[in-house]
Amino acid sequence: MCWQQDRAEGREMFARWRRRRALARVEPGDGSTLRRFRWWQQLSRSLYHLDTPSAGTEGGAPVRWSVDVRQWRTDDNGYVKVHLHRDGREHSVARAPAFFPVDGGTIEVATSSFGLRRCHLVTEDGTEQQLTPDPRSAEGRRARLERRRPALSRAVGAVSIMTLLVGVALLLQQIAVPLLQIPPVAARIGPVEPLIDLPTWLAIAVAVAAAAASTERALRLRYRWYLDAAGN
C-alpha cells in the first residue's frame, strides 16, 4: 500500500540522515596503543575485533580492527566514546552511536544502559557481520559458553527473557492501576487494586534481577526496547 511504502521511505531517509550525522562526528585517533583487556574490566569495558583484507597492504595482509568501548567513561556531555583501533593503534574516535568507514564497509556501534546493543560490519551490499568479542572480555566468555554448552546457554537466555517479562508486567501494572483509579473511571468499573503487591525487598530483588538479565543479553548484543528498557 502507498502509506506503507511512504513509511518505509521515511524510515530509510531518517536512517541515512542519522548515518550522515554520525559519520560527521568521527574524529581522528591519537595513535595510542590498544591496552590489553584486564579481568577487572568485565562489566565496564567491551572489546571486539574484526580481521579484514586490505587492498592497501602489501600482499593483501589482513588488517585487525578493534572496537574499544568503556561504558562507565563518558565525555563532558555524558556521551559514551567509541574508540576504533587499526592494528593496535587508535585510528578514530566517535561518540555512540558510531559509524566508522573501513575497508569493505562500515563498522556500526550502538550502546545501551547495560552494554553494547550493536557492533557489526555492514558491507556495501548491506550484508551484516558481527564483530568477534575479545576472549578475555565478558562478551567473549559468554560466547565461549554458547559454543561449548549450547543447551545451558539457551536456558540462561530463556531465564533472562522471563525475568524481563516479569519486569514489564510490573511496569504495566504501575501505569494501569493509577489510571483506573481516576474517579470517573473508577465510578464506571469499580475499585481497582494492584494484582501483585510486592514487599520492598522483593521489588528490589526483581529490579536487580532485571538489570542482570539485560546485562546478560547485552553480552550477546541482544536488545529490545520493550524488554531491556521497559523491563528495568
Image (cartoon, rainbow, N blue to C red):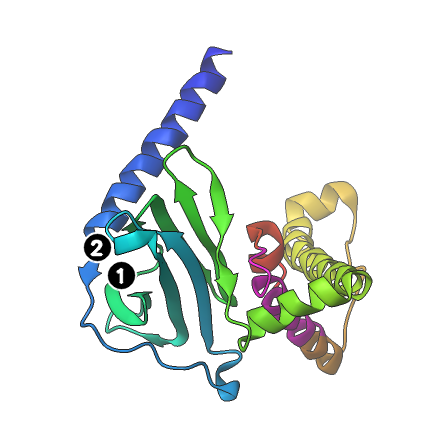
The residue indicated by pointer 1 is 94
**Do the CB atoms of the residues marked 1 and 2 lie less than 8 Å apart?**
yes
Please state the horizontal and vertical placement of residue 50, each as a whole percent of the image. 43, 58
Left or right side of 204 for 39: left
Left or right side of 106 for 198: right
The residue indicated by pointer 2 is 25
Q: Secondary structure at mark 1?
A: strand
Viewer-proximal residue among 43 and 171: 43
Q: Is residue 47 above or below residue 165?
A: below
- Count all numbered tags in the image, as a single digit: 2
At x 53%, y 80%, the residue is 42
Please state the horizontal and vertical placement of residue 176, each as a whole percent of the image. 67, 51
Q: Amino acid at mark 1?
A: Ala
At x 35%, y 37%, the residue is 15
Task: Check the picture and name the quadrant holding the C terminus.
Answer: bottom right
Question: Splitting the image into 4 quarters, where does residue 18 fall?
Answer: top left
Question: Splitting the image into 4 quarters, where does residue 94 fall?
Answer: bottom left
Left or right side of 219 for 194: right
Camera sees residue 99 = no
Q: Secondary structure at mark 2?
A: loop
Q: Is residue 121 above or below residue 217?
A: above
Q: Which residues are magenta?
A: 206-222
Residue 9 belongs to magenta span: no
Viewer-proximal residue among 42 and 203: 42
Q: Earlier in the sequence, mark 1 or mark 2?
A: 2
